[in-house]
Amino acid sequence: MIKLINNFINCVKNIDKNILKIMIHGFKFSFIICIISSIISFSYILNPISHILYDSGIILFKTGLTFGAMFFVCAFAIDTIKKQII
């Protein structure tokens, strides 16, 4: 188990710098989406007029998490493909 975690950490450290830069920008984008969803959800907590605010906050939060996960997975996939081609 520890060897698997160390292997994962080494893979993260060995990602190409350009791919890592794109991945970090994707994480920032995902974080901004999650912040916006938190603001929308907080406004629903303060003033529960419509369930549309609740639904939109939840949907945006799910979208932000999905984008973050996809940027992470795609960065590994692209890095692996790029290393196999070269």
Image (cartoon, grey):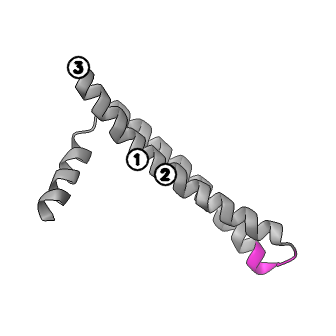
Q: Position of residue 49 (x, y in %)?
A: 87, 76
Q: Which residue is denoted by mark 3 in the rendering?
A: 86
Image position of 11 (left or right of 81): left
Quarter of the image containing the N terminus? bottom left
Disc on the earlier residue, 2 or 3 = 2
Task: Name the residue furthest right.
Answer: 49
Any part of residue 20 in sight: no
Callout 2 crowding tier (Cα within 10 Å): few <14, some 14–19, many ≥20: many
Residue 63 counted in the magenta span: no
Name the residue type under label 3.
Answer: Ile
Up the image or down, 32 lies above or below 22; here it is below
Marks 1 and 2, how far apart in space? 6 Å
Helix, strand or loop under label 1:
helix
Type of amino acid at the residue the image marks with label 1? Phe
| Residue 37 vs residue 83, the one in the foreground | 83
Is residue 4 depicted above or below 79 in this figure? below
Q: Nearer the viewer, mark 2 or mark 3?
A: 3
Q: Residue furthest left?
A: 3
Residue lying furthest top in this view? 86
Q: Quadrant of residue 45?
A: bottom right
Q: Is residue 77 above or below residue 45?
A: above
Q: Split into 4 quadrants, where in the image is the C terminus?
A: top left
- Residue plotted at (70% across, 65% down): 57
Q: Secondary structure at mark 2?
A: helix
From which residue to which does the magenta span run?
44-49
Residue 81 at what x, y percent from top left?
A: 31, 29
State whether residue 40 appears in this view.
Answer: yes
Q: Which residue bears the numbered disc 1?
A: 72
In the image, what residue type sits under mark 2? Gly
Q: Which residue is mark 2?
A: 68
